[in-house]
Image (cartoon, rainbow, N blue to C red):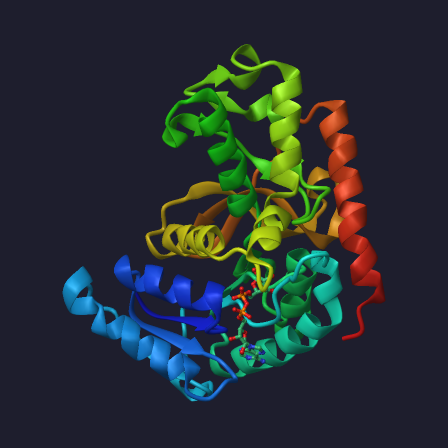
Amino acid sequence: MVNKITVVGAGNVGATTAQRLAEKELAKVVVMVDVVEGVPQGKALDQWESAPIEGFDTRVLGTNGYEETASSDIVIITAGIARKPGMSRDDLLNTNAGIVKQVSEHVKRTSPNAIIIMVSNPLDVMAYVAKQVTGFPRERVLGMAGVLDTARYRSFLAEALDVSVEDIQAMVLGGHGDTMVPLISYTTVSGIPVTQLMDRKRLDAIVDRTRNGGAEIVKYLKTGSAYYAPSAASVQMAEAIVHDKKRVLPCAAWLEGEYGMSGLFLGVPCKLGRKGLEQIIEVELTPQERTDLGKSAEAVREPMSVLKL
Ligand code: APR
C-alpha cells in the first residue's frame, strides 16, 4: 500500500471511489476533499465506521482544505458537475475546466509528486487542463475512461453471449464520448475472436450501446450520471499503480507521436506501474479503426480549442 491517496470531490463518484480504495487497503490514509462544508467529513466518518465490519485499516478522512492531502501519492479528481439528461459531456466543459484548474493548482502546491487520475468530464480535456496547470510529466497525469468504456462493452458482451465477464478480453480506445473506438479486432472470449461467436449485426448493436453507455445511465437516473462502474474503473487504475502491477489498460494518455498524433489526451493501451504511465503500447489497427481513432481525436481537439485556461 502507499501512504496517502486523495479523492477530490465527495459526490457520487468520489465517495464511492474512496470507499473502494479503503476496502482494498490501497493506502494508509484516504482523504476526501470537497467544497461543500461537512459533506466530505460526514461521508468519510461514515466510511471509517464501516471499517470494523469490512475489516480494513485504511483511515478515511474528509476535509474542505488541502493541507490534509499534502504529499499524496495519487490524487483522483472527480470534482465538478455531472451530466443531466440531454447533456453531452462537452456541455460540462467550462464549468468543470474552472473547477479542475483550481483543484490542479492546489495539487501542484501540496502534492508535487503525485500521480493524477482524472475522472471529471469531459475527461480528455480535463486531463489536459490538469497537465497544463500542474506541469507534471505525462507519466503522472492519466485519464480514466477506457477502463470504464471497456467494462461496459465487456458486460454487454458477456450478457449477450451468456459467458463470464472474466473471459471477455477487449479494449475501447479513443476519446470518452460517442466517438470512442471499441476494437472488435481485439475482442476475444478466452482467445476466441468474438466475430466467430456473434454475427456482425449484434456486435454492431453492442458497440453502439457501449458508445452511449453513459447516456443510458443518465437517462435512468435523471439527476446525475453513473458512479459505480466509474469508481471501480478509477480504483483499478490506482491498484495497478500502487501494486506496480504493470497492467495493460486502456487509459487517456498524453500522446507524443504515438498512433501518429501529438498534443492531446486520447484513450490508448497503457502500461501502469508505480511510476504511473510506464509505456504506451501501439497496436496494429484496421484501416477503419485508424480512421475512427482519428475522428475521435478530432472530437477531443474541438473542445480543447475553445477552452480558456
Ligand atoms: N473542489 C472540490 N470539490 C468540488 C469542487 C471543487 N472546486 N467543485 C465541485 N465539487 C464537488 C461537488 O461539491 C460535489 O460533491 O464535486 C462533487 C461532484 O459530485 P456529484 O455532483 O455527485 O457528481 P459525480 O457523479 O460524482 O460526478 C463527478 O465525474 O464522472 C464524472 O461526469 C462526471 O464530471 C463529473 C464527475
258 left or right, relative to 9: right
Residue 122 screen position, x and y as percent: 67, 60
At horizontal 80% and vertical 60% (from top left) the residue drawn is: 303
At horizontal 80% and vertical 54% (from top left) the residue drawn is: 301
- With respect to residue 11, does 256 lie above or below? above
Front-most of residues 102 and 133: 102
Q: Exactly how many numbered labels are in the figure? A: 0
> Most extreme residue toward the top, as rendered?
196
Residue 238 screen position, x and y as percent: 41, 56
Residue 47 screen position, x and y as percent: 29, 71
At horizontal 62% and vertical 81% (from top left) the residue drawn is: 102
113 left or right, relative to 105: left
- Asked where in the image residue 269 lies, by quadrant, the reply is top right
At horizontal 19% and vertical 61% (from top left) the residue drawn is: 54
Residue 136 screen position, x and y as percent: 59, 68
- With respect to residue 89, does 92 lie above or below? below
Residue 25 visible at all: no
- Asked where in the image residue 304 lies, by quadrant, the reply is bottom right
Front-most of residues 159 and 207: 159
Residue 53 visible at all: yes
